[in-house]
Amino acid sequence: MAAVGTLTGSQLAEAAEVSDELASRNIDVCFFGEAKYPQRLALMNRPPAVLFTWGNQDLLNELGLGMCGSRNASERGIAAARHCGVVVADHKLMIISGYARGVDTETHLAALGSGGRTAIVLAEGILHFRRKRAFAGVDFDPTRIVVISQFAPSQVWSVGAAMSRNRVIVGLGKALVVIEAGETGGTLDAGMQALKAGKPVLALEFSDGATPAGNRLLHEKGAVRINNKQHLADVLRTIRTTPEFEPISSEQLSLL
């Protein structure tokens, strides 16, 4: 970022305009190194230098679980996302996910509909954030929601930004739940990132041989196979009772 003294008059005017708009929308700014910067994210390799947030910033340090899946999820995947989101919320864990249609949206709706908390991690600048029509039927309570962006406020969505955004979902969560992952794409990449970071990955295993290809790949790499809601609940109970920054491995959870 250029020093203020080197900015032109038009650049200073633009910066002031953006600053005013952020303030008018009650958007906060959090820099790496500040006390309010989320501790779990600070521990990751190359954490974002700055976070723009809307909603309850205190939620950044809540114990939560990343959840991801395809924006073009199957009906089974959508139902699974909804059921898993309710189980996560029932265990007093915050849901951390993106803001795409499909799995992301269903997990947030499940959290809010169950009285839980949710973190919406954007793949674009926070000035593009709007409440989507899918959320019209739930209580969009800003005390139970935090919206997060690591990007310049006006930056538009891109594939690269979505991949970078996944690092924040992984970093903020104690573990990552994978609903449906393809053989390639962002969901599989998020699962691989989590495994590389030593975070437990809970990848659903569907019956009748219908487990998505990406989930099977993650199972081969060491992800925990989650077969049903009760199994997920058992795993979450262990995650919930493990001390905040004590590491927990997929191998430990696979024994449950």
Image (cartoon, rainbow, N blue to C red):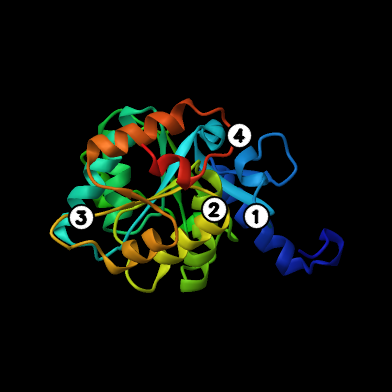
Q: How many marks?
A: 4
Residue 146 image position (x, y, % from top left): 47, 40
**Residue 168's disc number:** 2
Seen from the viewer's position, the closer of residues 183 and 148 is 183
Amino acid at pointer 3: Phe
Q: Are marks 4 and 2 in contact (CB under 8 Å)?
A: no
**Residue 91's disc number:** none
Where on the picture, by quarter, is residue 108? top left
Amino acid at pointer 1: Pro
Residue matched to label 4: 245
Tell which circle, 1 or 3, labels the residue nearer the N-terminal end.
1
**Residue 206's disc number:** 3
Amino acid at pointer 4: Phe
Q: Secondary structure at mark 2?
A: helix
Residue matched to label 1: 48
Which residue is situated farthest in the front direction here? 255
- Visible in this render: residue 38? no
Q: Are marks 2 and 1 in contact (CB under 8 Å)?
A: yes
Where on the picture, by quarter, is residue 214? bottom left
What distance separates the C-alpha of mark 4 from that of mark 3? Answer: 31 Å
Residue located at (47% from left, 72% from top): 158
Q: Secondary structure at mark 1?
A: loop
